[in-house]
Amino acid sequence: SSGRIFFESSTWIMSLEEEIIKTQNILQPLVDRPQLKAKLLSKPPFRFLHDIVSATTRSTGFAEGLYKGEELDSGAIRDKESKLNYLGKIAACVSICIGKNVDMRGPKVVAGLEPEKTNQFLQQLAHCASDRSLDFREAVRMSLQGVAPSSEGIPRIKTRSELENEVDIGLEFEKERPSGEMPPSRAGARSANSESKGLEPPPRLGGMGIGISELDGQIEACDGSPDTTRRLLEPIITRPKLTDKLLGKPPFRFLHDIISEVIRQTSFGSGLYDTAESDSSKVTDKNSKITYLAKLVKLVGMQLNTIVEARPTKIVSGLEPNNTNRLLQLFAVAASFAPNSDHSVRAVLASGEFQSCRPAVPSSVEIKCDVMPAEEKQGLTRSH
């Protein structure tokens, strides 16, 4: 009898050790701290788990918006009910993303029991946070609304073909609209008598409660200097490092890394780039680089309803670094204060105008890309 107990205990210990190693290998690359020490993972205290969730959200954007107020402060969560509520939320979010309920019980976790299951949950958390195909914002919305997880209901970022299909449906809807019925118009972009173009970008309203006049002030403050670029981007991303040398003449790979990281952290611009474009090692020829940058120029100009002076051909050639920095600054403003870019992304992809930035002529011939449709430019009373 005692031998059997020893055998089962040894098996359990070995299983836990293996789970801890898996957790460390999968999760530690996502978080700088806390350090995932075996001692803590063998019986994870609540404060430790809270720190892990918070760090994962900061580094990846996963579960952003799931918690509010005192829930963001581990020191304010003291009673058992509050701890269970906190754990229940992140468990629900992960469950939504994997399509089934996680095998973790809050009361056991709070009591320091079943650490192997807690480690398995942390591994699932890491997998979800690393999955760029997941729609993090939708996952949070579904979790807070109490949607039950299912394999068919995993929230995914829509592919380019799916977005184009939605645009086609929207255009068909516009064709069926009674002639006397006017569609909603963008604030400040077009007059009430403007002709509908079928797909309207969103109003310029800040995603963090910022008003239009305040947003205008943020845009005006974009001066193209490296210091301003750092001031606006460093609260969003921790890598790549925004050094004076790189910002003084930004190479394409550096810009690609910045753009990708901002999209990953904020979801602004999600769906703008396809799989190949999202991999900097596959965006190597000049035409592809120009197209990549032209998409961003048009998206930022459309989202903020402003003229972006950066020209992709100049950026790829390492010229006009001031305009390149200003593009990065406007990108940061849009991602921070007007992050819901779904409609603008669809409008950019539907317009196809960025394709005109792919040179069909020798590279020595300069091509200046228009970043806004002519009818929007006519509706602007100021330029930046």
Image (cartoon, rainbow, N blue to C red):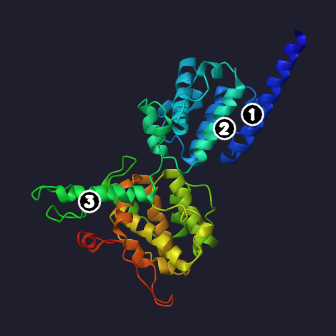
Could you tell me which residue is drawn at 56 percent across and 68 percent down? 255
Q: Residue at point 53% right, 51% down?
A: 265
Does 317 sit above or below residue 19? below
**Residue linked to disc 3:** 171
Residue sitting at the far front: 152
User: Which residue is at the front of the view, 107 or 54?
Assistant: 107
Whether pointer 2 and pointer 1 mark residues with C-beta atoms closer than 8 Å, the reply is: yes
- Mark 2 and mark 1: span between their CA atoms? 9 Å
Residue that numbered label 1 is attached to: 19
- One can see residue 320 in this view: no
Q: Is residue 166 above or below residue 242?
A: above
Is 218 above or below relative to 156? below
State the residue lying farthest toward the top.
1
For marks 1 and 3 on the same chain, the one whose residue lies earlier in the sequence:
1
SS for tag 3?
helix
- Report the amino acid beneath label 2: Gln
State which quarter of the image contains the C terminus: bottom left
Mark 2 neighbour class, 10 Å CA radius: few under 14, some 14 to 19, many 20 or more: many
Q: Nearer the viewer, residue 284 or 62?
A: 284
Q: Which residue is mark 2?
A: 123
**Amino acid on which the number 1 mark rests in the picture:** Glu
Q: Amino acid at mark 3?
A: Leu
